[in-house]
């Protein structure tokens, strides 16, 4: 699927931002005077954070970003020369590895029953889910043929993300294929499918990401229904629980924050901050959110810093780390939260 066709609202001023970051990177990370976001959730970019030598550690699209249990920031890119790049929190280089994923798209760290940290990698071109040890040994791989009974034409399946439950069940979002969510048990045996294209409330259109949401004391599945500009919560059985509209956005990935807030990476140049009641309280890279009669009015991107945020991670200090797709092969961005 060509995502460039859905980006009519994306910011066009990236070139100026890239030039600024390049000049800053030569002297190390520096704080930007530009503040993005509103209210208690305002952020300032750390210019030059994460910039590396393109000749030795290149990136193509930066698709996912998270943190390992050593407190290091881990980036996933679809450049096969180094699919996985690890940074210290200050943006300095730690390590790089992996050359198996031509369309590396999603990355999650989860502990197994023995407490070992494992990496869940999704590749949307191969349509595989790969379970790796930190040193790169592949423990398991789910190939497309595991869903051959569901897809008469397996080329219509393109996995984009995975959510892992506490008991080991996992759910795959087919965001670039047929818009389904697939459920597998801890033994990697297929259980059921829900979602799919259509006009019913439970249907989906480009379910780009799926995330385990435990903020209300239950294990719910939050799906970024990107092409519909909706956030949808499902039960583990696939029952639609609630829907929140985020008009004007292209919700692509989710990150937990403190105080039951979440951050949503929107592909059209914004990071949305939602509170525990699913209300947008800040738009990082956009105009302030406006509600009218309880309904959110269309969000409007407005910045020269973000281009196509594909994933976001929020550390314990409240800083944002943003991985961007189709952004001139740029490295990830870091934003520190501005204290009141």
Image (cartoon, rainbow, N blue to C red):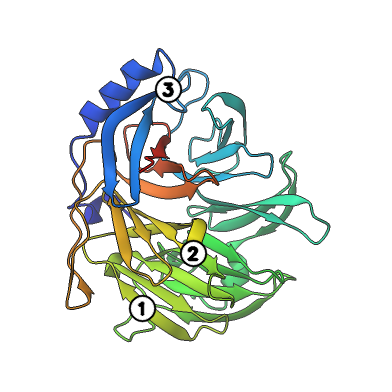
- Residue 288 or residue 225, whichever sits in front: 288
Q: Secondary structure at mark 1?
A: strand
Tell me the CA gap for discs 3 and 2: 30 Å
Image coordinates for residue 194, horizontal then vertical, percent = 48, 81
Question: Which marked residue is nearer to the observer: mark 1 or mark 3?
Answer: 3
Asked which secondary structure carries label 2, the reply is helix
- N-terminal of the pair, mark 1 or mark 3, is 3
Q: Up-down: is 24 above or below 280?
A: above
Q: Which mark is residue 156?
A: none
**Residue assigned mark 3:** 29
Q: Mark 1 highlights which residue?
A: 243
Quarter residue 12 falls in: top left
Whole-number angstrom distance, CA of label 1 to CA of label 3: 39 Å
Which of the two marks, 3 or 2, is nearer to us in this view? 2
Out of 279 and 299, give the one closest to the viewer. Answer: 279
Residue 15 vertical placement versus 234 (above, below)? above
Tell me the residue that label 2 is attached to.
260
Residue 210 locus on image (x, y percent): 49, 65
Which residue occupies the foreground of this view, 111 or 319? 319
Q: Quadrant of the N terminus?
A: bottom left
Question: Is residue 317 at least partly visible in the picture?
Answer: yes
Q: Residue at x 35, y 43 (%)?
A: 340
Residue at image point 44% right, 60% down = 262
């Amino acid at each position: 699927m060509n995502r460039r066709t859905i980006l009519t609202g994306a910011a066009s001023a990236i070139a100026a931002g890239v030039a600024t970051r390049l000049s800053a990177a030569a002297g190390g990370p520096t704080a930007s005077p530009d503040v993005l976001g509103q209210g208690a959730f305002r952020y300032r970019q750390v210019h030059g954070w994460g910039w590396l030598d393109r000749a030795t550690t290149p990136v193509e699209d930066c698709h996912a970003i998270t943190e390992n249990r050593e407190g290091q920031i881990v980036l996933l890119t679809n450049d096969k020369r180094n699919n996985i790049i690890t940074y210290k929190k200050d943006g300095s280089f730690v390590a790089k590895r992996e050359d198996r994923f031509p369309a590396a798209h999603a990355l999650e760290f989860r502990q197994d029953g023995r407490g070992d940290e494992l990496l869940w990698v999704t590749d949307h071109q191969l349509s595989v889910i790969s379970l790796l040890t930190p040193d790169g040994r592949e423990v398991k791989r789910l190939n497309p043929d595991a869903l051959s009974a569901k897809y008469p034409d397996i080329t219509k399946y393109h996995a984009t993300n995975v959510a892992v439950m506490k008991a080991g069940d996992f759910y795959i979002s087919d965001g670039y294929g047929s818009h389904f969510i697939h459920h597998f048990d801890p033994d990697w045996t297929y259980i059921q499918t829900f979602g799919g294209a259509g006009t019913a409330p439970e249907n989906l259109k480009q379910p780009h990401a799926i995330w385990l949401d435990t903020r209300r004391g239950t294990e719910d599945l939050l799906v970024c229904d990107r092409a519909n500009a909706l956030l949808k919560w499902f039960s583990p059985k696939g029952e639609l629980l609630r829907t929140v509209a985020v008009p004007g956005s292209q919700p692509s990935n989710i990150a937990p924050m403190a105080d039951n807030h979440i951050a949503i990476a929107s592909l059209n140049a914004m990071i949305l901050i939602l509170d525990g009641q699913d209300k947008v309280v800040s738009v990082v890279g956009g105009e302030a959110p406006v509600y009218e009669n309880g309904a959110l009015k269309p969000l409007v991107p407005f910045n020269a810093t973000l281009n196509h945020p594909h994933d976001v991670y929020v550390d314990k200090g409240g800083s944002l780390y943003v991985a961007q797709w189709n952004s001139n092969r740029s490295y990830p961005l870091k934003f520190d939260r501005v204290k009141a």
